[in-house]
Amino acid sequence: MNLKLRRAQRLSGASLLLLGAAATPVLAQDKPAATELPAVTVTAPSPIVRRAVVPSRTTSRVARAAPARNRERTAESTPTPPPPAAPQQGVLPIVTNQFATVTVVPNEEIRREGGGQLGDLLFSKPGITGSSFAPGASSRPIIRGLDVNRVGIVENGTNSGGASDLGEDHFVPIDPLATNQIEVVRGPAALRYGSTSIGGVVSATNNRIPDALPSCGAQPFQSFGMPVKAPLANAATSPCVTAETRSAFSSVDRGVESGVLLDTGGGNFAFHADVYGRNTTDYSIPSYPYLADQTRSVANGRQPNSATRSDGASIGGSYFFQGGYIGAAITQNDSLYHIPGIDGADHNTRIDGHQTKINVKGEYHPDATAIDAIRFWAGATDYRHNEIGLADPADPNTDGVRQTFTNKEQEIRTEVQLMPFNARFAEVTTALGFQVGHQELSAPSPDNPGTLFNGLWDPNNSTRVAGYAFNEFKFTDATRAQIAGRIEHVELHGTTPDFPADFLPDGTPQAGISRNPSFTPKSGSIGLLQDLPGGMVGSITAQYVERAPKAAELFSRGAHDATATFDIGNPNLTIETAKSVEVGLRKATGPFRFEATVYYTHFNNFIYRRLTGVMCEDDFASCGTPGAEVNQAVYSQRDANFRGGEFQSQLDVGAFQGGIWGIENQLDVVRATFTDGTNVPRIPPLRMGGGVFWRDDNWLMRVNLLHAFAQNNVAVIAETPTPGYNLLKAEVSYKTKLDRNWFGAREMIAGIVGNNLLNESIRNSVSYTKDEVLMPGIGVRAFANFKF
């Protein structure tokens, strides 16, 4: 189908709120009560897992693992300590023990914020935004202006396996409704997950493969990572069942979502099952959405063709044995959503996507003097979606499949963490990893069944094999360093036609040219972590990362509806190189918590879609004809510079009405230019904001205002300036323990969140559809979670 997508705000008082960062607790009338900080534990940044001193329910199950030596003796002499009280909700999570910036979205924040896609959930986080192609349906995270082929998305350690990196209209097959924690990792994460994570990694985790036996009532919480006899000696011999329900309603799109999660275990086995679903109608918008066409009808103040429906289910289990565990899960994700915009509304375009994913993971702590832990992850994905719509907008009988995308992907990753050893100058810990992956892609189009090249690209496949090593040096308790390296080999097999003609003069299909490029990217990083006075931690990291071109960049040769471009792949692309430096300063303790980061990255041979200014239709022969409305884009390479910074803070000002009130703020900026001074396209604007909060052991109340400045640093061709906006949010939530005699629930969290309370017309500068698709208007989201 021929999908044709065509392309003055006030400054808020948010800047005044930033002054709160300079305030100190001495300004308060009352001394703040002691803040119980959450135990922020992350697993994605490094294969080296630091050992926790005391096991507890608020730390990572993996991090609770005890050293391999003397496990039996330790198990017999060390009782299981009781779990500490849960931290107050709303405390800003700051990660200080990693060598680069890590943004953590814990479970309770995910429940409060909601969002159908990871890009929606992370939209306002410093340094992160979403692609917002179809808000609520397809929005991929963008980190520091980098997206798709430079941002990895993983779930429970393996690739998400969808097609969101192949088209901005494609959904991310990870639903926040079934997610327990999200980590956004910059820096050396690229070396662990691959060169396609050069900009960072978004890691989602849940309990679909249990790594601990469930806790019921007064029974101790058991983890495989505790001393080896503990999980076996204390494990439940009778079944233990826990459950959680997650539900919400949103007014802006009349959305309803609900999920049920079950965990059970007995003896040496643990099992998990979950099922979820959500349904929304066209969402409300503050004003007319189409900038280029003022003649179209928009019914009831809603964004036309923006309804969504999604559901999923998963079942998994694990077996625990002396020193470790092994588990597996099978997951089904389904989504049917409409594509907003002029062309999408005219053709009733929607995407019907399905993914089946099988994952296996495990960990083993052998009784060995050299090896601390062996971990592995494996995953296989079968993904397919159909893009459905009217071939003729005036004829409903022409409804049908216009394009299909398939992705079959397999991945195995194994890591071995060695025991720390004393090298005199430092205690050294080493982890070695091996990764192999295979991907098969196709994008056939039934609109042109008689042609050889009848889709965005012909079937292609790629294979990646990689090895990596991380070394951490503990010079003193206050000074640590990291050196890491990765080498991978990538082989791709695909077909590109001879441009500039799709067909020979006699009209017969043009023979394709088989291409089999291979690349061997090499990467390395070095970092320093230093404890500073006042509870602060400073870090500096330098990276050299090489990225091999991906199949879409090499083999594309057709109309790409999502980007409104006619993409022409370049089989002569070479390795892209990024040289980065990041400096950070963080503080996670006390009444004033903050995180500040600045960075600079120089790209050699930065791969991007270069718009030529020529307009096309469905095939190359149409390029340059009058009335064509799709931008011709050739994948090209140029040197580029990215620089910017992020800041966020939270200050507990004083005690009030039995709780703590305070102020918080944030700022992020990224500037990206090619070496000739012209702008890299679709870069987020400068954003700054802040707010006030009040919290106690049960209640959290918060009001925040985020101001995004106008984005006038646009590409020379086919990109327009984007006005600024003010995004006002407010929330009230209540968390409490419950009497099980009431209706069986032991814990509840419920609340109301107001979004875009100023009802502003918000356009996202990084979205390809920003001139036709507004972000949702004013709305209220009510949610409730119960744990049984």
Image: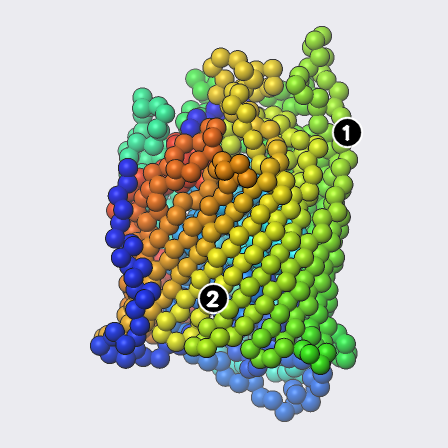
State the residue at coordinates (63%, 62%): 526
Q: Which disc is residue 333 wearing?
A: none
Cα gap from disc 1 to disc 2, whole angstroms: 50 Å
SS class, disc 2: strand
Q: Is residue 484 above or below residue 535?
A: above
Crowdedness of circle 2 by 10 Å Cα count: few (<14), some, many (20+)?
Answer: many
Which residue sits furthest top? Answer: 506
392 and 608: which one is in front? 608
Total numbered labels placed on residues in the image: 2
SS class, disc 1: strand
State the residue at coordinates (77%, 80%): 369
Relative to 518, 685 lies left or right: left
Q: Quadrant of residue 285?
A: top left
Q: Is residue 469 visible to us here?
A: yes
Q: Is residue 325 above or below residue 574?
A: below
Q: Which disc is residue 585 wearing?
A: 2
**Mark 1 or 2 closer to N-term?**
1
Q: Quadrant of residue 51?
A: bottom right
State the residue at coordinates (71%, 63%): 469
Q: Which residue carries the number 1 mark?
A: 514
* The C terminus sits in image quarter: bottom left
Amino acid at the residue labelled 1: Ser
Q: Is residue 149 above or below residue 475?
A: above
Which residue sits furthest front? Answer: 676
Residue 360 in picture, x, y percent from top left = 68, 59
Relative to 402, 360 lies left or right: right
Residue 705 in picture, x, y percent from top left = 30, 54
